[in-house]
Image: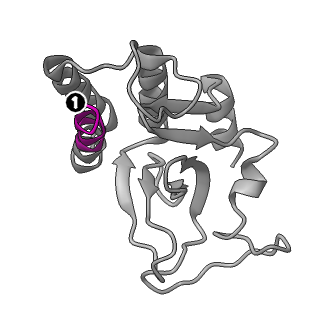
């Protein structure tokens, strides 16, 4: 866990937003709280199953999706520390790859922050919102390149574009 905390500390990002979506990132003082409801119960006792669909004991929550609250977690059983997400509240955990490593996920957060410098989720686009389709396509390609994962980031940009379309005249 120390290597995860050290990597997050080095990144120095707490919240990163892109349009309406964002990532709330754990820090050294909050990472234990991020585990509550996943690998720890409300009393702080470890819980995890061993069956497929159970929360796995090797999963460590490092962030949450600010829009829907889904956990973003590292699988510590793999040396590359891949990062996943899974929908909460559906009765079982179906992990979806976000990035092939913790370092690539943290690089993505830095990249997104540098693009927008958003301090909060937007309700509607503003003058700094990226709307150019070619620029969005380039951002999507860069996210895929950095993360080593295609589906998650294609969906991420698609949802962003759908949000933009809601506000077109």
Q: Give the number of marks.
A: 1
- Quadrant of res 133: top left
Magenta stretch: helix, strand or loop mostly: helix
Q: Which residue carries the number 1 mark?
A: 168
Q: Quadrant of residue 137?
A: top left
Near-viewer residue (26 or 17): 17
In the rendering, at what x and y percent does residue 97 appear? 35, 54
Work out whether 102 lies above or below 168. below
Residue closest to the eye, 57 or 154: 154
Q: Position of residue 141 (x, y in %)?
A: 20, 28
**What residue is shown at x 46% (from left), y 15% (from top)?**
114
Q: Is residue 75 visible?
A: no
User: Where residue 110 sits in the image (x, y, percent)?
Assistant: 49, 23
Neighbourhood count class around disc 1 (C-alpha, 10 Å): few under 14, some 14–19, many 20 upward: few
> Where the C terminus falls, by quadrant?
top left
Q: Is residue 139 above or below residue 3?
A: above
Tell me the residue at 20%/18% (across/down): 132
The answer to which of 143 and 3 lies nearer the viewer is: 143
Question: Is 117 positioned to the left or the right of 169 in the image?
Answer: right
Q: Residue at x 77, y 46 (%)?
A: 30
Q: Which region of the structure is painted magenta? A: 158-169
148 to the left or right of 53: left
* 66, above or below 51, in the image: above
Q: Is residue 166 magenta?
A: yes
* Vertical placement of residue 49 versus 41, above or below: below
Q: Residue furthest left?
A: 134
Is any part of residue 74 visible from this angle?
yes
């Amino acid at each position: 866990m120390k290597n995860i905390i050290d990597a997050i500390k080095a990144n120095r990002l707490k919240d990163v937003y892109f349009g309406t979506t964002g990532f709330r990132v754990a820090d050294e003082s909050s990472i234990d709280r991020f585990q509550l409801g996943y690998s720890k119960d409300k009393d702080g006792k470890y819980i995890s199953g061993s069956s497929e669909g159970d929360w796995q004991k090797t999963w460590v929550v490092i962030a949450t999706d600010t829009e829907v609250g889904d956990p973003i977690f590292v699988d510590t059983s793999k040396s590359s520390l891949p990062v996943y997400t899974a929908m909460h509240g559906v009765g079982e955990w179906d992990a979806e790859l976000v990035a092939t490593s913790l370092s690539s996920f943290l690089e993505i957060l830095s990249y997104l922050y540098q693009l927008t410098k958003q301090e909060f989720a937007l309700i509607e686009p503003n003058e700094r919102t990226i709307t150019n389709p070619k620029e969005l396509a380039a951002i999507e390609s860069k996210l895929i390149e950095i993360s080593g994962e295609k589906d998650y980031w294609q969906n991420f940009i698609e949802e962003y574009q759908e949000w933009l379309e809601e506000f077109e005249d």
